[in-house]
Amino acid sequence: MNIHKKIKRQIEINPILLYMKGSPKEPSCGFSAQAVQALSSCGKRFAYIDVLENPDIRKALPEYANWPTFPQLWISGELIGGCNIILELLHNGELQKLIDKVEEQ
């Protein structure tokens, strides 16, 4: 499977997906740690992909998503953004609304 198809499939099968450095229990960068905290505060399980353990995804995802940095949050197949956007959405209440909509689908 080519890498873009693999990424597309991961996004399709995981309603809430965080591409990050490290894991939720052991983030490898501060931005990933903040993103995990924000998502965890919304009370819904999410999938993650450690881009440090998947160099092919780490290289291809910025091109696929047209987003250069990690973490990257995808909800219902849509790129939400990186750490700053995730935190902004958390603080204005929109992240919880996006997360809650996933249950409705």
Image: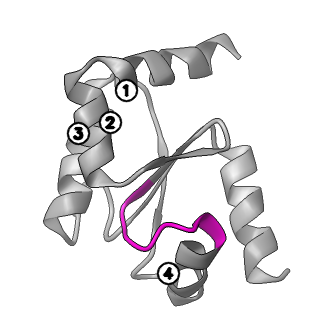
> Outermost residue toward the front?
66
The colour scheme is one colour
> Outermost residue toward the right?
1
For the point 42% across and 26% down, the residue is 44
Q: Main secondary structure of the magenta part?
A: loop
**Mark 2 to mark 4 CA distance (whole Å):** 21 Å
Q: Earlier in the sequence, mark 2 or mark 3?
A: 2
Q: Is residue 37 above or below residue 21?
A: above
Image spot of residue 85 (x, y percent): 31, 44
Magenta stretch?
Answer: 64-72
Image spot of residue 51 (x, y percent): 45, 75
Decide if residue 68 is on the left or right side of residue 17: left
For the point 51% across and 88% down, the residue is 55
Q: Residues within 10 Å of mark 4 (few under 14, many from 20)?
A: many
Residue under label 4: 58
Q: Quadrant of residue 65?
A: bottom right
Question: From the image, which quarter does the C terminus lie in?
Answer: top right
Q: Residues within 10 Å of mark 1 (few under 14, many from 20)?
A: many
Q: Nearer the viewer, residue 38 or 27?
A: 38
Residue under label 3: 87
Q: Amino acid at mark 4?
A: Arg
Image spot of residue 30 (x, y percent): 14, 63
Question: From the image, which quarter does the N terminus lie in?
Answer: bottom right
For the point 65% across and 35% down, the residue is 76
Q: Amino acid at mark 1?
A: Leu
